[in-house]
Image: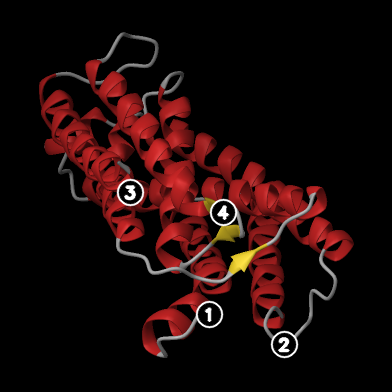
Amino acid sequence: MTTVAGLLAVALYLATTGYLIVATRTQPLAAGQPRAPLVLWLAALIVHLAALIPLVVTEAGLNLCLGNALSASLWLVAALLWLTALRHPLAVLGVMILPLTALAALGALLCEDGTRYATSAGIDVHILFSALGWAFLALSTAQAAVMAAQHRALHNHHTSGIVRYLPPLFSMEVWLFRMIFIGWLFLGLSLLSGLIFVDDLFAQHLVHKTILSLLAWVIFSILLLGRWRLGWRGTRALAWTTGGFVVLVLAYFGSKLVLEVILGRV
């Protein structure tokens, strides 16, 4: 049943992606209007969640193998983007996010059993803050990539294709920094809750995650400070956003990739 639901979620994500591409070529997806792609998108999220829960939540604890962790993280990113698209015309970002989410959903079905993590209320709070911080910053980075393409197209006077259906660059930039601020806030709460609830945040198997997460938080702090005090925008802001997120990805998934894929350990 889990496999069937997972494969159905993959199909729904890909169908939604195709629908978004067709829809944006016919008319802009203005916020607040009934849109069939968002209905299909919601169905994909529900089916994906139904497939994901049995894989992650087990009697022995949370199974956070690399595939499950990526699948859960990208589900949250896709869900946040869906909620955002209800109020702002950003559904077009699904063209980038949803195929990755489909790939992650498929990867979770192929994931071998990993280490089971017993949790407590405090650890659950820490995991929630970490997931929300990662999701908002991932969504910010995806938007930054789209903005870079939009900026390049406008600079070269190429306004054909999907670029002409994007919101104005100024509006995109305002939403970008709002999401970065929310992600930065949750990342800070994640680090704080880790200090409170995790027994030894600088233990050997956690030290790289802690240091890299702290470094990412500092990078985003500098970016927000630069925006506030110096008016950073454009390519400089996009570069700092991408750099901070790369560090965060290394913190969250770097060790899992090395241990589970390269070294074949859990």
Helix, strand or loop at disc 1? Answer: helix
106 relative to 31 in the view: left or right: left
Which amino acid, by three-letter code, is at mark 4? Trp
| 3D distance between C-alphas at marks 2 and 1 | 12 Å
| 3D distance between C-alphas at marks 2 and 4 | 22 Å
| Residue 8 image offset from top left, x and y in percent | 22, 38
Taking 186 as reference, is 206 above or below it?
A: below
Question: Of discs 4 and 1, which sits in the foreground?
Answer: 1
**Which residue does the numbered mark 2 point to in the structure image?**
204
Question: Of discs 2 and 4, which sits in the foreground?
Answer: 2
Sequence-first tag of 2 and 4: 4
| 3D distance between C-alphas at marks 4 and 3 | 14 Å
Asked whether 179 or 223 is in front, the reply is 179
Regarding residue 154, the answer to whether it shows in the image is no
96 relative to 224 in the view: left or right: left
Sequence-first tag of 2 and 3: 3
Asked whether 6 or 159 is in front, the reply is 6
Regarding residue 67, the answer to whether it shows in the image is yes
Which amino acid, by three-letter code, is at mark 3? Thr
State the scheme by which the image is colored. Answer: secondary structure
Asked whether 145 or 76 is in front, the reply is 76
**Which residue does the numbered mark 3 point to in the structure image?**
101
| Residue 214 image offset from top left, x and y in percent | 71, 69
Confirm or deny contact between disc 2 and disc 1 (CB under 8 A).
no
Question: Of discs 4 and 3, which sits in the foreground?
Answer: 3
Residue at 83 percent across and 58 percent down: it is 192
Residue at 52 percent across and 59 percent down: it is 241
Sequence-first tag of 2 and 1: 2
| 3D distance between C-alphas at marks 2 and 3 | 31 Å
Categorize mark 4 by other alpha carbons within 10 Å: few (<14), some (14-19), many (20+): many
Helix, strand or loop at disc 4? Answer: helix
**Which residue does the numbered mark 1 point to in the structure image?**
255
